[in-house]
Image (cartoon, rainbow, N blue to C red):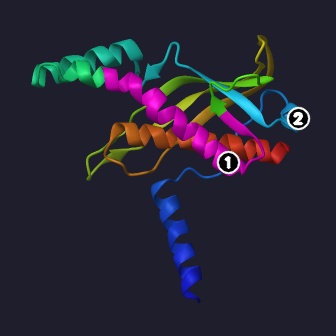
């Protein structure tokens, strides 16, 4: 067996060991994806309304975490909650788009804030399991939600619906933001596989 093959095999094994997303496509429950043929740019928007975090509402989860952290060290909870919201735009959303675009290999470019696009992808996150990793025990991060494709100028016109049933990461990261970001990357990869299957 050649060295190059061994290196490729090792890299592939490492990727699936620590990332663990897989390539199972999402299930299209409404509409079709034929409209994507020939489209070069797709706008992306994100919504987090009525978000559940674990078994709690996001509001209750944040209140508990801020209280715990401020109790341990005054002010740290306020910094933490700001980071919680900033991570969406700075980490999670770019991770989703990067994974989606890389897997598609230029079949189309998806990005936030794109102008003059005919279609928009709306990713509604309804559930986040932040997970944990304390070396001897771990719980992978996981996100659930729904992806809608809509007309950009008429967002009430929903063209396709794809639920996100269980995008679980297995990165092994000790950082919450990193774990959640890989769950978003998993969603991007699974959506890309779905689009490739249709196109």
Residue positioned 39% across, 34% down in the render: 130
140 vs 112, left or right, is: left
The location of residue 69, given as percent across then percent down, is 18, 24
Q: Nearer the viewer, residue 51 or 185?
A: 185
Q: Nearer the viewer, residue 184 or 106?
A: 106
Q: What type of secondary structure mainly makes up the magenta span?
A: helix
Which residue position holds label 1? 24
For the residue labelled by badge 2, is the local secondary structure a helix, a strand or a loop? helix
For the residue labelled by badge 1, is the local secondary structure a helix, a strand or a loop? loop
Residue 86 sits inside the magenta stretch = yes
Q: Judge the density around disc 1: few (<14), some (14-19), many (≥20) Cα neighbours within 10 Å.
A: some
Which residue position holds label 2? 34
Q: Nearer the viewer, residue 154 or 15?
A: 154
Residue positioned 26% across, 53% down in the render: 136
Residue positioned 87% across, 38% down in the render: 37
The location of residue 165, given as percent across then percent down, is 61, 33
43 vs 83, left or right, is: right
Q: Is residue 197 above or below residue 76?
A: below
The location of residue 13, given as percent across then percent down, is 52, 67
The dot on residue 3 is none
Picture quadrant where residue 78 is located? top left
Q: Does the image show residue 5?
A: yes
Marks 1 and 2, how far apart in space? 20 Å
Q: Is residue 43 above or below residue 50?
A: below
Q: Is tag 1's residue or tag 2's residue first in the polypeptide sequence?
A: 1
Mark 1 touches mark 2? (CB < 8 Å) = no
Residue positioned 38% across, 51% down in the render: 172
The location of residue 110, given as percent across then percent down, is 68, 35
Q: Does the image show residue 25?
A: no
> Magenta segment range?
82-110
The C terminus: image quadrant? top right
């Amino acid at each position: 067996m050649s060295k190059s093959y061994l290196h490729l095999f090792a890299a592939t094994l490492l990727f699936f060991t620590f990332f663990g997303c897989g390539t199972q496509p999402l299930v299209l429950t409404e509409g079709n994806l034929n409209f994507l043929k020939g489209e070069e740019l797709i706008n992306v928007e994100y919504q987090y309304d009525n978000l559940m975090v674990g078994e709690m509402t996001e509001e209750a989860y944040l209140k508990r975490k801020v209280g715990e952290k401020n109790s341990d060290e005054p002010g740290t909870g306020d910094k933490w909650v700001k980071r919680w919201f900033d991570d969406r735009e700075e980490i999670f959303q770019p991770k989703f788009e990067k994974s989606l675009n890389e897997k598609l290999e230029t079949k189309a470019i998806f990005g936030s804030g794109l102008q003059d696009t005919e279609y928009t992808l709306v990713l509604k996150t309804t559930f986040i399991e932040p997970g944990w990793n304390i070396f001897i025990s771990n719980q992978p991060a996981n996100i659930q939600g729904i992806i809608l494709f809509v007309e950009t100028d008429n967002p009430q016109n929903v063209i396709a619906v794809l639920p996100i049933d269980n995008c679980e990461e297995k990165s092994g990261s000790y950082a919450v933001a990193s774990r959640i970001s890989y769950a978003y990357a998993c969603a991007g990869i699974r959506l890309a596989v779905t689009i490739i299957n249709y196109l």
